[in-house]
Image (cartoon, rainbow, N blue to C red):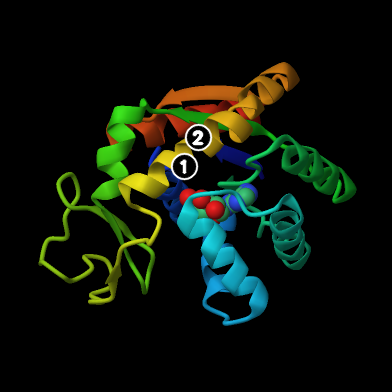
Amino acid sequence: MVNIILLGPPGAGKGTQARRLVEERGMVQLSTGDMLREARTSGTDMGKRVAEVMDRGELVTDEIVIGLIEEKIAADTGQGGGFIFDGFPRTLPQADALGAMLTRMGQRLDAVIEMRVEDEALVSRVSGRFTCGNCGEVYHDETRPTKVSGTCDVCGSTDLRRRADDNAESLKQRLMEYYKKTSPLIGYYYAQGDLFTVDGLAEIEEVASKIAGVLAQSASS
Ligand code: AMP
């Protein structure tokens, strides 16, 4: 069992790789972005506040996301495959909180995989992206269109969605947040000896095989 963090700017491919790890290794994906998107549809006051912050491309408070992660990992032991933290932690206090949670559970963090992609590529990746509202499969207008227009290749659903924050203006803010608040985590995990960097611009298969290599190395150490 391995617990990993996928770290990288919006559009780096964290969600795509996390989905593969879930399918191929029975790992459990914990995406705070997905949890927050679910919370915003709840119609509660908290949900409405979260929606405004997300649409502006800013970060939701540490307290809220730490609470969400705590709830999920208490309810799930990683099903033997381990956890993939996707989009969490995004700040140093979140990283400290995660370390403490894992220690309390008698678990450890095995690897932090930084997916490195330069900014220009992120703009086109994010602005062309859409996902299946039913099964979560991720597509892109140019690089990964559906085989039949308007229909998910995997489950056949026609509920294909674009995120409200996948536009140029929000992306600019999301990148600012990433560089200001999240990128310091690269140094933090490097210092802990947990950091591995992969080229997020490579083909999906190639990135997946690099990640598999990191997992094999961490599992044996
Ligand atoms: P994502 O799906 O990971 O790109 O997240 C979408 C949005 O949800 C972000 O732009 C933030 O507004 C919010 N969000 C997701 N994860 C976190 C986190 N760990 N800390 C703070 N805000 C988050």
> Where does the C terminus fall, quadrant-wise?
top right
| Placement of 117 over or under 83, stated as above or below | above
Given residues 38 and 98, the one toward you in this image is 38
Which x, y percent locates residue 71?
75, 65
Residue displayed at 76% across by 60% down: 67
Residue displayed at 33% across by 60% down: 137
Real-space Cα separation, disc 2 to disc 1, in angstroms? 5 Å
Please tell me how crowded label 2 is: few (under 14), some (14-19), or many (20+) other residues with Cα within 10 Å. some
Q: Secondary structure at mark 1?
A: helix
Residue 130 relative to residue 33: left or right? left
Given residues 9 and 191, the one toward you in this image is 9
Q: Is mark 1 within 8 Å of ligand 1?
A: no
In which quadrant of the rendered view does residue 32 lie? bottom right
Image label count: 2
Which x, y percent locates residue 131?
32, 62
| Placement of 120 over or under 77, stated as above or below | above
> Where does the N terminus fall, quadrant-wise?
top right
In which quadrant of the rendered view does residue 191 lie? top right
Task: Identify the residue under disc 2.
Answer: 176
Task: Identify the residue under disc 1.
Answer: 173
Given residues 167 and 205, the one toward you in this image is 167
Mark 2 and mark 1 residues within 8 Å of each other at the beta carbon? yes
Q: Secondary structure at mark 2?
A: helix
Residue displayed at 38% across by 28% down: 117
Q: Amino acid at mark 1?
A: Gln
Which x, y percent locates residue 121?
28, 32
Q: Identify the disc placed on residue 144.
A: none
Which x, y percent locates residue 195?
61, 23
Q: Amino acid at mark 2?
A: Met
